[in-house]
Image (cartoon, rainbow, N blue to C red):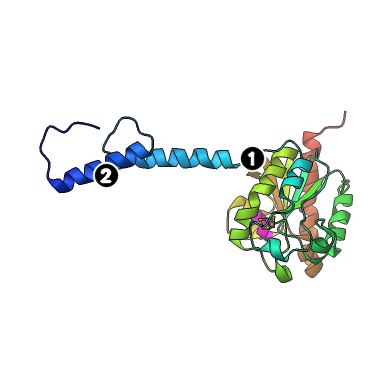
């Protein structure tokens, strides 16, 4: 610890000792009385701890096996089946919704009810099959009565989706519905204003369209969804020209 030549009053001495102890505990070898340094060091250490906590997997199968019994949030206790994702592990296009519904919860697969059938028709219209894309949700467990996911549930579950994206490395991502779009883009902008433009999600081009369930309720969205998916297909064709 620094030697102080000038005699200091007891209160100041105590404060300096406290600061020095805190800095030593946080790994600052050279003791400098500066709260900025302490805070900076704490942030560095917290960042390192966060990085250390994120485990990376070699395959979707390995990732699934590791997380399929997750109970990190209360939805784990009320789900029937864990709903991981479906499609090709090498998909170039990934569709992301918010959470499993009743049919998905019963079958353990995303987008299998009426909304899922409609999504398949939409995919077919732009010449994609369900098997060649990848479909997942932010939440892997159904919220009771299909209520909206809570922010804390999404925050807890999101690392699973992030790992799926890292493993698949899609060229393009399409968010299905307001909740998925706003959660991934971290915005409260209405979905109507998020459509029709390319965003970026962690370096991947990202498009937003309505959830197929919304389309079932409001058939007037059909034209908008058609425009959105054509935009998606055009970008896909640009990235994957046929020789
Ligand atoms: S919703 Fe996600 S975080 Fe919550 S229990 Fe299911 S898998 Fe785990």
Packing grade of label 1 (10 A; few <14, some 14-19, many >=20) is few
Closest to the observer, 56 or 97: 56
Q: Is residue 189 magenta?
A: no
Residue at 67% from the left image edge and 60% from the top image edge: 178
Q: Position of residue 197 (x, y in %)?
A: 67, 48
Q: Position of residue 173 (x, y in %)?
A: 72, 45
Judged left or right of residue 144, residue 187 is: left
Eyeballing the image, is 239 above or below 147? above
Choose top left, top right, bottom left or bottom right for residue 163.
Answer: top right
Q: Is the CB atom of the residue marked by disc 1 within 8 angstroms of ligand 1's nearest atom?
A: no
Residue bearing mark 1? 55
Choose top left, top right, bottom left or bottom right for residue 6.
Answer: top left
Please, what secondary structure does the residue beneath circle 2 have?
helix
Judged left or right of residue 227, residue 180 is: left
Residue at 85% from the left image edge and 63% from the top image edge: 113
Q: Which residues are magenta?
A: 178-182
Quadrant that contains the N terminus:
top left
Residue bearing mark 2? 18
Marks 2 and 1 sit apart, C-alpha to C-alpha, by 36 Å
Q: Main secondary structure of the magenta part?
A: helix
């Amino acid at each position: 610890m620094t030697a102080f030549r000038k005699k200091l009053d007891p209160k100041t001495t105590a404060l300096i000792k406290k600061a020095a102890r805190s800095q030593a505990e946080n790994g600052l070898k050279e003791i400098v009385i500066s709260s900025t340094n302490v805070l900076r060091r704490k942030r560095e250490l917290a960042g390192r701890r966060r990085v250390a906590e994120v485990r990376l997997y070699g395959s979707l199968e390995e990732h699934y096996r590791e997380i399929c019994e997750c109970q990190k949030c209360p939805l784990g206790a009320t789900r029937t089946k864990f709903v991981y994702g479906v499609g090709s592990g090498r998909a170039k296009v990934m569709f992301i919704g918010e959470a499993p519904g009743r049919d998905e919860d019963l079958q353990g697969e995303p987008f299998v009810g009426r909304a899922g059938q409609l999504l398949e028709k939409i995919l077919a219209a732009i010449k994609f099959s369900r098997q060649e894309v990848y479909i997942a949700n932010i939440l892997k467990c159904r919220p009771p009565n299909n209520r909206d996911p809570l922010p804390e549930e999404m925050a807890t579950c999101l690392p699973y989706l992030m790992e799926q994206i890292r493993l698949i490395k899609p060229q393009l991502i399409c968010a299905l519905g307001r909740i998925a779009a706003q959660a991934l883009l971290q915005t409260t902008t209405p979905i109507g204003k998020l459509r029709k433009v390319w965003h970026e999600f962690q370096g991947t081009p990202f498009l937003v369209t309505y959830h197929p369930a919304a389309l079932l309720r409001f058939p007037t969205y059909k034209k908008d969804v058609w425009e959105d998916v054509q935009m998606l297909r055009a970008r896909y064709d640009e990235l994957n020209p046929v020789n």
